[in-house]
Protein backbone atom coordinates (compact mmCIF):
# COMPACT_ATOMS: atom_id res chain seq x y z
CA UNK A 1 0.00 0.00 0.00
CA UNK A 2 1.60 3.24 -1.15
CA UNK A 3 1.63 6.30 1.05
CA UNK A 4 -0.60 9.18 0.11
CA UNK A 5 1.09 11.98 -1.76
CA UNK A 6 1.69 15.11 0.32
CA UNK A 7 -0.96 17.72 -0.13
CA UNK A 8 0.21 20.70 -2.12
CA UNK A 9 -0.06 23.86 -0.01
CA UNK A 10 -2.32 26.59 -1.31
CA UNK A 11 -0.87 29.87 -2.41
CA UNK A 12 -1.98 32.67 -0.14
CA UNK A 13 -3.25 36.05 -1.29
CA UNK A 14 -0.38 38.51 -1.78
CA UNK A 15 -1.79 42.00 -1.32
CA UNK A 16 -0.39 45.32 -0.10
CA UNK A 17 3.09 44.00 -0.83
CA UNK A 18 4.76 45.20 -4.03
CA UNK A 19 6.35 42.63 -6.28
CA UNK A 20 10.08 43.42 -6.66
CA UNK A 21 10.93 45.02 -9.96
CA UNK A 22 11.83 48.23 -11.76
CA UNK A 23 9.40 48.23 -14.66
CA UNK A 24 7.43 51.11 -16.11
CA UNK A 25 4.42 50.06 -14.01
CA UNK A 26 6.47 50.25 -10.83
CA UNK A 27 7.78 53.71 -11.79
CA UNK A 28 4.34 55.20 -12.36
CA UNK A 29 3.27 57.76 -9.79
CA UNK A 30 1.00 56.32 -7.11
CA UNK A 31 -1.47 59.16 -7.62
CA UNK A 32 -1.78 58.29 -11.30
CA UNK A 33 -2.67 54.71 -10.44
CA UNK A 34 -5.27 55.88 -7.92
CA UNK A 35 -6.82 58.25 -10.47
CA UNK A 36 -6.89 55.55 -13.15
CA UNK A 37 -8.56 53.09 -10.77
CA UNK A 38 -11.10 55.73 -9.73
CA UNK A 39 -11.89 56.61 -13.35
CA UNK A 40 -12.28 52.98 -14.39
CA UNK A 41 -14.49 52.37 -11.35
CA UNK A 42 -16.79 55.23 -12.41
CA UNK A 43 -16.89 53.90 -15.99
CA UNK A 44 -17.84 50.37 -14.90
CA UNK A 45 -20.39 51.71 -12.42
CA UNK A 46 -22.41 53.51 -15.09
CA UNK A 47 -21.61 51.23 -18.07
CA UNK A 48 -21.02 47.66 -16.80
CA UNK A 49 -21.27 46.11 -20.26
CA UNK A 50 -19.23 43.35 -21.79
CA UNK A 51 -17.17 45.71 -23.94
CA UNK A 52 -15.96 48.00 -21.09
CA UNK A 53 -15.29 44.94 -18.93
CA UNK A 54 -13.24 43.36 -21.72
CA UNK A 55 -11.33 46.60 -22.31
CA UNK A 56 -10.42 46.93 -18.63
CA UNK A 57 -9.43 43.25 -18.52
CA UNK A 58 -7.15 43.92 -21.50
CA UNK A 59 -5.57 46.83 -19.64
CA UNK A 60 -5.04 44.68 -16.54
CA UNK A 61 -3.41 41.88 -18.53
CA UNK A 62 -1.20 44.34 -20.40
CA UNK A 63 -0.21 46.01 -17.14
CA UNK A 64 0.64 42.63 -15.59
CA UNK A 65 2.84 41.78 -18.58
CA UNK A 66 4.61 45.15 -18.42
CA UNK A 67 5.13 44.78 -14.66
CA UNK A 68 6.34 41.17 -15.09
CA UNK A 69 3.99 39.88 -12.42
CA UNK A 70 4.80 36.18 -11.79
CA UNK A 71 2.07 33.58 -11.62
CA UNK A 72 3.15 32.68 -8.11
CA UNK A 73 1.46 35.75 -6.65
CA UNK A 74 -1.94 34.53 -7.81
CA UNK A 75 -3.80 32.75 -4.98
CA UNK A 76 -5.10 29.22 -5.27
CA UNK A 77 -8.86 29.07 -5.79
CA UNK A 78 -10.49 26.73 -3.26
CA UNK A 79 -12.95 24.11 -4.43
CA UNK A 80 -15.85 25.52 -2.42
CA UNK A 81 -15.61 28.78 -4.38
CA UNK A 82 -16.01 26.91 -7.68
CA UNK A 83 -19.02 25.15 -6.16
CA UNK A 84 -20.58 28.48 -5.12
CA UNK A 85 -20.04 29.91 -8.60
CA UNK A 86 -21.65 26.84 -10.17
CA UNK A 87 -24.56 27.04 -7.76
CA UNK A 88 -24.98 30.75 -8.45
CA UNK A 89 -24.96 30.18 -12.20
CA UNK A 90 -27.58 27.43 -11.98
CA UNK A 91 -29.76 29.56 -9.71
CA UNK A 92 -29.43 32.59 -11.99
CA UNK A 93 -30.52 30.50 -14.97
CA UNK A 94 -33.94 30.04 -13.36
CA UNK A 95 -34.51 33.80 -13.72
CA UNK A 96 -34.91 33.36 -17.49
CA UNK A 97 -34.86 36.25 -19.91
CA UNK A 98 -33.58 36.69 -23.44
CA UNK A 99 -31.86 35.15 -25.27
CA UNK A 100 -33.94 31.99 -25.21
CA UNK A 101 -32.48 28.66 -26.29
CA UNK A 102 -34.73 25.78 -27.27
CA UNK A 103 -33.74 22.23 -26.32
CA UNK A 104 -36.35 19.99 -27.86
CA UNK A 105 -39.70 21.15 -26.50
CA UNK A 106 -38.10 23.03 -23.60
CA UNK A 107 -37.12 26.70 -23.86
CA UNK A 108 -34.46 28.01 -21.50
CA UNK A 109 -33.85 31.72 -21.02
CA UNK A 110 -30.19 32.56 -20.60
CA UNK A 111 -30.62 36.20 -19.60
CA UNK A 112 -30.15 35.55 -15.88
CA UNK A 113 -27.08 33.39 -16.49
CA UNK A 114 -25.50 36.03 -18.72
CA UNK A 115 -26.12 38.71 -16.08
CA UNK A 116 -24.53 36.48 -13.45
CA UNK A 117 -21.50 35.87 -15.66
CA UNK A 118 -21.20 39.58 -16.38
CA UNK A 119 -21.28 40.48 -12.68
CA UNK A 120 -18.72 37.75 -11.94
CA UNK A 121 -16.43 39.01 -14.70
CA UNK A 122 -16.84 42.57 -13.41
CA UNK A 123 -15.85 41.48 -9.90
CA UNK A 124 -12.80 39.61 -11.18
CA UNK A 125 -11.68 42.58 -13.27
CA UNK A 126 -12.03 45.01 -10.35
CA UNK A 127 -10.13 42.65 -8.06
CA UNK A 128 -7.39 42.32 -10.66
CA UNK A 129 -7.23 46.09 -11.04
CA UNK A 130 -6.81 46.58 -7.31
CA UNK A 131 -4.25 43.79 -7.13
CA UNK A 132 -2.22 45.40 -9.92
CA UNK A 133 -2.00 48.64 -7.94
CA UNK A 134 -1.02 46.68 -4.83
CA UNK A 135 1.66 44.65 -6.63
CA UNK A 136 3.32 47.65 -8.30
CA UNK A 137 3.02 50.40 -5.67
CA UNK A 138 5.13 50.89 -2.59
CA UNK A 139 3.06 51.73 0.48
CA UNK A 140 5.39 54.64 1.28
CA UNK A 141 4.35 56.34 -1.99
CA UNK A 142 0.63 56.36 -1.18
CA UNK A 143 0.61 59.06 1.51
CA UNK A 144 2.46 61.74 -0.53
CA UNK A 145 0.23 60.97 -3.53
CA UNK A 146 -2.98 61.27 -1.51
CA UNK A 147 -1.72 64.50 0.08
CA UNK A 148 -0.97 66.00 -3.34
CA UNK A 149 -4.28 64.91 -4.85
CA UNK A 150 -6.17 66.35 -1.88
CA UNK A 151 -4.35 69.68 -1.91
CA UNK A 152 -7.40 71.60 -3.26
CA UNK A 153 -9.37 70.45 -0.20
CA UNK A 154 -7.00 72.24 2.17
CA UNK A 155 -8.75 75.52 1.44
CA UNK A 156 -11.85 73.99 3.06
CA UNK A 157 -9.80 73.23 6.20
CA UNK A 158 -9.97 69.49 5.61
CA UNK A 159 -7.04 67.64 7.26
CA UNK A 160 -5.81 66.01 4.08
CA UNK A 161 -2.32 65.32 5.45
CA UNK A 162 -3.71 63.54 8.51
CA UNK A 163 -5.97 61.43 6.31
CA UNK A 164 -3.03 60.54 4.07
CA UNK A 165 -0.88 59.51 7.03
CA UNK A 166 -3.72 57.43 8.48
CA UNK A 167 -4.24 55.66 5.16
CA UNK A 168 -0.53 54.97 4.76
CA UNK A 169 -0.20 53.56 8.28
CA UNK A 170 -3.27 51.37 7.79
CA UNK A 171 -1.91 49.97 4.52
CA UNK A 172 1.48 49.36 6.11
CA UNK A 173 0.07 47.69 9.23
CA UNK A 174 -2.47 45.42 7.52
CA UNK A 175 -0.07 42.79 6.06
CA UNK A 176 2.00 42.89 9.24
CA UNK A 177 -1.04 42.15 11.40
CA UNK A 178 -2.18 39.41 9.03
CA UNK A 179 1.18 37.66 9.53
CA UNK A 180 0.92 38.05 13.29
CA UNK A 181 -2.60 36.62 13.36
CA UNK A 182 -1.50 33.69 11.20
CA UNK A 183 1.26 32.89 13.69
CA UNK A 184 -1.17 33.14 16.59
CA UNK A 185 -3.65 30.85 14.87
CA UNK A 186 -0.96 28.30 14.07
CA UNK A 187 0.28 28.36 17.67
CA UNK A 188 -3.28 27.93 18.89
CA UNK A 189 -3.77 24.84 16.73
CA UNK A 190 -0.58 23.27 18.12
CA UNK A 191 -1.89 23.39 21.66
CA UNK A 192 -3.23 20.03 22.92
CA UNK A 193 -6.99 19.81 23.12
CA UNK A 194 -8.87 18.42 26.06
CA UNK A 195 -11.11 15.53 25.07
CA UNK A 196 -14.55 15.86 26.61
CA UNK A 197 -17.69 14.15 25.45
CA UNK A 198 -20.04 16.81 26.77
CA UNK A 199 -21.34 19.15 24.11
CA UNK A 200 -21.66 21.99 26.59
CA UNK A 201 -18.03 21.59 27.59
CA UNK A 202 -16.88 21.66 23.95
CA UNK A 203 -18.81 24.87 23.31
CA UNK A 204 -17.31 26.38 26.43
CA UNK A 205 -13.80 25.43 25.30
CA UNK A 206 -14.38 26.97 21.86
CA UNK A 207 -15.66 30.18 23.42
CA UNK A 208 -12.67 30.28 25.77
CA UNK A 209 -10.28 29.70 22.86
CA UNK A 210 -11.92 32.50 20.86
CA UNK A 211 -11.56 34.90 23.79
CA UNK A 212 -7.91 33.95 24.18
CA UNK A 213 -7.29 34.55 20.48
CA UNK A 214 -8.97 37.98 20.59
CA UNK A 215 -6.99 38.99 23.67
CA UNK A 216 -3.73 37.87 22.07
CA UNK A 217 -4.60 39.69 18.83
CA UNK A 218 -5.32 42.94 20.68
CA UNK A 219 -2.05 42.61 22.61
CA UNK A 220 -0.06 42.03 19.41
CA UNK A 221 -1.76 44.97 17.67
CA UNK A 222 -0.97 47.29 20.59
CA UNK A 223 2.64 46.14 20.69
CA UNK A 224 3.05 46.68 16.95
CA UNK A 225 1.41 50.11 17.21
CA UNK A 226 3.84 51.10 19.98
CA UNK A 227 6.83 49.96 17.92
CA UNK A 228 5.55 51.80 14.85
CA UNK A 229 4.98 54.97 16.88
CA UNK A 230 8.55 54.88 18.19
CA UNK A 231 9.88 54.36 14.66
CA UNK A 232 7.83 57.30 13.31
CA UNK A 233 9.01 59.56 16.15
CA UNK A 234 12.65 58.61 15.52
CA UNK A 235 12.26 59.55 11.84
CA UNK A 236 10.88 63.04 12.44
CA UNK A 237 7.19 62.55 13.17
CA UNK A 238 4.08 61.64 11.20
CA UNK A 239 4.34 64.76 9.04
CA UNK A 240 7.35 63.33 7.22
CA UNK A 241 5.23 60.46 5.85
CA UNK A 242 3.19 62.71 3.56
CA UNK A 243 5.85 65.37 2.98
CA UNK A 244 7.89 63.46 0.41
CA UNK A 245 7.91 65.18 -3.02
CA UNK A 246 5.83 63.37 -5.60
CA UNK A 247 4.00 64.14 -8.80
CA UNK A 248 3.21 62.91 -12.32
CA UNK A 249 5.86 62.65 -14.98
CA UNK A 250 5.85 62.09 -18.72
CA UNK A 251 5.19 58.35 -18.45
CA UNK A 252 2.14 59.10 -16.29
CA UNK A 253 0.60 61.28 -18.98
CA UNK A 254 1.26 58.53 -21.51
CA UNK A 255 -0.52 56.05 -19.23
CA UNK A 256 -3.47 58.45 -18.88
CA UNK A 257 -3.68 58.81 -22.65
CA UNK A 258 -3.63 55.03 -23.23
CA UNK A 259 -6.30 54.37 -20.60
CA UNK A 260 -8.54 57.18 -21.89
CA UNK A 261 -8.15 55.97 -25.48
CA UNK A 262 -8.96 52.33 -24.68
CA UNK A 263 -11.86 53.16 -22.38
CA UNK A 264 -13.19 55.76 -24.83
CA UNK A 265 -13.20 53.27 -27.72
CA UNK A 266 -14.88 50.63 -25.52
CA UNK A 267 -17.54 53.09 -24.38
CA UNK A 268 -18.20 54.26 -27.95
CA UNK A 269 -18.63 50.64 -29.12
CA UNK A 270 -20.88 49.87 -26.18
CA UNK A 271 -23.14 52.87 -26.84
CA UNK A 272 -23.28 52.59 -30.64
CA UNK A 273 -22.51 49.48 -32.68
CA UNK A 274 -22.38 46.64 -30.17
CA UNK A 275 -24.92 48.14 -27.82
CA UNK A 276 -27.46 48.58 -30.61
CA UNK A 277 -26.94 45.08 -31.97
CA UNK A 278 -27.24 43.63 -28.45
CA UNK A 279 -30.55 45.41 -27.86
CA UNK A 280 -31.91 44.16 -31.16
CA UNK A 281 -31.14 40.58 -30.24
Image (tube, rainbow, N blue to C red):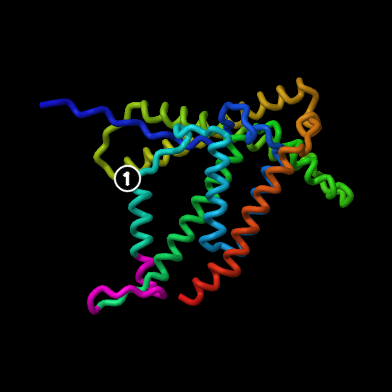
Residue that appears at 23% across and 79% down: 105
**204 sits to left or right of 271:** left
- Element type at mark 1: helix
Work out whether residue 70 or residue 143 is closer to the camera in this orientation and state it. Answer: 70
Residue 250: quarter of image: top right
In the rendered image, residue 234, in percent from the top left (x then y), is placed at: 76, 20
For this orientation, the residue located farthest to the bottom is 105
Residue 95: quarter of image: bottom left
Instruction: Give the residues in magenta.
Output: 91-105
For this orientation, the residue located farthest to the right is 155
Looking at the rendered image, the quarter that the N terminus falls into is: top left
In the rendered image, residue 168, in percent from the top left (x then y), is placed at: 69, 36
Work out whether residue 241 or residue 135 is closer to the camera in this orientation and state it. Answer: 135
Looking at the rendered image, the quarter that the C terminus falls into is: bottom left
Residue 269: quarter of image: bottom right
Residue that appears at 71% across and 43% down: 254
Tell me if residue 260 comes above or below residue 278 in the rendering: above
For this orientation, the residue located farthest to the front is 273
Tell me if residue 225 comes above or below residue 211 in the rendering: above
Residue that appears at 26% across and 27% down: 6
Work out whether residue 137 or residue 266 is closer to the camera in this orientation and state it. Answer: 266
Is 44 magenta? The answer is no
Residue that appears at 29% across and 75% down: 102
Give the residue number, with chain letter if any, for mark 1. Answer: 200
In the rendered image, residue 154, in percent from the top left (x then y), is placed at: 86, 47
Residue 104 shows in this picture: yes
In the rendered image, residue 194, in percent from the top left (x then y), is placed at: 30, 31
Amino acid sequence: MTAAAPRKPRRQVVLLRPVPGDTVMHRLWAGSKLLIVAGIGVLLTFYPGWVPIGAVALLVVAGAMLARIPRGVLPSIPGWLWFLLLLGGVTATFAGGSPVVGIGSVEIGLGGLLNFLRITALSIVLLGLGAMVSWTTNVAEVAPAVAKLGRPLRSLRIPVDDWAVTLALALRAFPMLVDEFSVLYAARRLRPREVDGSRRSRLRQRASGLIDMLAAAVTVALRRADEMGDAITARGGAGQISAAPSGPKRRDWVAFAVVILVCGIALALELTILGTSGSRR
